[in-house]
Amino acid sequence: MKRASIKDIARIARVSHSTVSRALRGSPLISEETTARIRKIAEETGYRPSFAARSLVTSRTATIGVVVTSIADPFAAEVVLGIEDAANDHDYSVLLANSNAQPEREMRVVRAFEERRVDGIIVTSSRVGAIYGDMLSQARVPIVLLNNQHPSEFMHSVMIDNVTGGLDATRHLVGLGHRRVAYIGDRFGCQSDTERFGGYRSALDLAYLPFLPEYVTHGDGKPDGGAPAMESLLSLPVPPTAVFCYNDMTALGAMSAISSRGLRVPDDISVVGFDDLFVAQYSSPPLTTVRQPMRDMGRIALETLIHLLGGAASEPNVKIPGQLIVRQSTCAPKEPA
Amino acid sequence: MKRASIKDIARIARVSHSTVSRALRGSPLISEETTARIRKIAEETGYRPSFAARSLVTSRTATIGVVVTSIADPFAAEVVLGIEDAANDHDYSVLLANSNAQPEREMRVVRAFEERRVDGIIVTSSRVGAIYGDMLSQARVPIVLLNNQHPSEFMHSVMIDNVTGGLDATRHLVGLGHRRVAYIGDRFGCQSDTERFGGYRSALDLAYLPFLPEYVTHGDGKPDGGAPAMESLLSLPVPPTAVFCYNDMTALGAMSAISSRGLRVPDDISVVGFDDLFVAQYSSPPLTTVRQPMRDMGRIALETLIHLLGGAASEPNVKIPGQLIVRQSTCAPKEPA
DNA sequence: TGCTCGTCTGCAAACGTGTGCAGCGCGGGC
DNA sequence: GCCCGCGCTGCACACGTTTGCAGACGAGCA
C-alpha cells in the first residue's frame, strides 16, 4: 500500500489535484467549504505531501546540511543541538555529516549535500575552507562557518571572541595575584589558538608582566596532549603558578599531570580552560573556564542562514563574546609574588 | 546560474537525456565510447543528479531518519557517530532530529520524516514507542529501536545486555571482598534500570549475600540526582562500602557527594558506573564502569536497517554484551568483612 | 537484394507537486 | 437582454530523473 498522493485525495474529494494543492497550502482562491472538506479528507487519509516532488518545482528543500568533524565531540554536539532546535522552529530539517577531518570524506559530504540540494550549509570547526568555496560559487548555496579556522571573506561566519576570552582568562589569573602565568596551546597552530594566545599576551602586557617563551608549550587539544605539556612546565627551574589552557580537554590533561606529581589544583597551581564543556563542572576540582555559548552559537548560525536564504543581507562576521566562569580550579598563589 | 541538469549534458553531448541517464548509471546498453564521453562532460560541468527527482521515480531517498532525545547527550552522540559512519559506507545520508523528550516535538519529527520519505528510521532511548508504530504500519518504513525502553514485538531493536552488565559490575565488587554493596538506580523506572537492578540482585544471590532494601536508592540519571542519592546512603547507620550506579552520570554525582563528606574513592567507598562515557576516563579517580560499545551499536542498528531495506529478514532483537572496564574507582574494602 | 539479428539510441510516459491561464457560472448594471 | 466582472475550479505544463518500448543502423546470411 503506497502512500496517498495528492491525486488520491482529489479523486475522493471529486476535485482536481490543483484544487487540492491550493486548498492545502491555504490559497485564497479556494472557497472555505472546499478547503475545509479537502483538509478533512487529507487528515483522515494521513496524507503527507512529498517534499521531493515539491522541491522539484520550488527548487527548495527546506533542508540544511551540517558538517562537523565528529558529532562525538561535545562541542560539536552542543552546537548541533542549537542548530537543530532553531531549524525546527523554522520548519527546516538538518542533514548531519561527520567529516572525521578526512579530506576525502569531506568531499563525499559535499557531494551528498549537492545531490540532495540542501538549501544551505553550516560547517563547524573545519580546517578546510576551499571545498566549500567551490560549492558556494557553483550552486549559490549560502554557507555559514562556525568557529572555522580560515574564515574566507566570501563566506559568512559565526565565531567566539577568542582574543577577549583569552584576555579575560589571563586577567583573572593575574588579578588573583599570579605573576608566573603559562599558556598551553594547540600544536596545530590554528587560528583560535593564535587568537587566544594573543589575548594571553595582551593581558600580560596590561599587567606589565614579562612574556617568557619557556612558559608557552603545546598540546593537541585533548587530555593526552595536555598532560605532557604540563609536565614540561612543571620541570622548569621556576615553574609557573598558573596555567591558561587552550581548551577544557587540554586543561583536564594538565590537571591530571599536576596531581600525578603530587601537587594540587588550585593550591599549588591554578588552571583555567576554555569552552565550558559539560565535564568542566564535574572535574575535580570543577574547572574555571571561558564559556562558549555553544547552543546559542548554533542557533545564531542557523538564523544567519535563514536570513541569507530570504535574500536579506546579513552581518558577514558575527563575533560572540565568551564568559568567564569561575569555579574551584583557581585561587591566589601560595607564595606571595 | 542554475545547476546543470541531465538535459543540459544531453544537449552538449548531442544525445538524448535518456542516454545520459543510462551512461551515468553504467548501463550496459550504452557503448563504451558514448559512456566515457558523457562521463567526461558530466565531470567537467560539475553535474550532480538531483536525488529529489530520482527518488520521485525510484521511491527511495537513500536517507534515513535518526531521532534522539538530545544530541548533546554523549551517549546519543556516540551512537549517532556510529550510525552516520555506517550510513556513509552504504551511501546513505542521515537526517537528525532531537525530540527533547517532548511528545509534541516527537510528532513533528515523525511528520517531517514522513514528508521527506526517509527509507528507514532509527530511534534511540525513547520512552514512547507508539507513535512509531503508526508510522511503521502506515508507510511500511522499517524502524530500528536502540536501547528503547519499550521494545515492541513488531519492531526490531538493538539493546545492551543490561542484566549481564549489572551482574558483572556487582560481581566485580563482590569479588574484591565487598559485602555491603548498594545500588543507585533511575527513579523513572525505565526498563534498563529494572534490568541492571536485576543483574545486581542476581550477583548478590550468587554470593549468598542478603538483599537489603535500604541499600537501594534512586537518582535521575544525572550527576545532580546521583549526589543526593549517595548522601542518603552515607547517612545510613551502616553505610555500604561499594556502590553500583545506574550510569556514569549518576556515578559522577555519587563521587562528588562522597568527597564532599571528606571520604575518598575508592579507599572508603568503591564506585562502579555504566556506559563508559568519555568522561569516565578523566574523572578523578577514573571510573570503573561497564562499557557500552555505543559506536558499534549505532553501526549495528544501521546495518540491521539496511538488511530490512533489502527485504531480508533480520534478527528482530539483537542483544549486545557490555564489557567491564576496571579503573581506579574500585578496590578491596578497608575493613575486612 | 532482402531478411534477420544484435547493438545502440531516442521517444514518451511516469513519479507528485505547484502555478499561469483559461473557462465556467452567476449576479448586477446598463 | 447583453455584457462585464467576480469568485471559483480545472487544464496543462513544468520540475529532473528512470525505464519500457520502439526504431535506426550496420553486419551477416541466404
Image: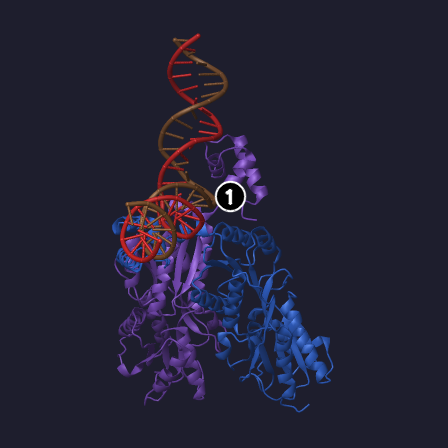
Chain colours: A purple, B blue, C brown, D red
Q: Quadrant of the C terminus of chain A?
A: bottom left
Residue A233 seen in the current view: yes
Q: Is residue B4 left or right of residue A47?
A: left
Residue A8 or residue B234, whichever sits in front:
A8
Residue A42 or residue A240, whichever sits in front:
A42
Instruction: Please tell me which residue is depicted at 34% across the width and 86% down the height of the picture.
Output: A232
Say which quarter of the image contains residue A196.
bottom left
Label 1 marks which chain's residue? A
Instruction: Please tell me which residue is depicted at 27% across the width and 48% down the height of the picture.
Output: B11
The amino acid type, in three-letter code, at marker 1 is Ser
Residue B313 percent location from the top left of the image? 58, 64
Residue A64 or residue C6, whichever sits in front:
C6
Disc 1 residue crowd, few under 14, some 14–19, many 20+, Cα 10 Å: some
Say which quarter of the image contains residue B320.
bottom right
Residue A195 percent location from the top left of the image? 29, 69
Rendered view: A65 above or below B250: above
Rendered view: B39 above or below B206: above
Which residue is the site of mark 1?
A: A5
Q: Is residue B179 left or right of residue B281?
A: right
Q: Is residue A119 left or right of residue A20?
A: left
Residue A293 seen in the current view: no
Residue B74 or residue A38, whichever sits in front:
A38
Q: Is residue B95 left or right of residue B211?
A: left
Rendered view: A314 above or below A112: above
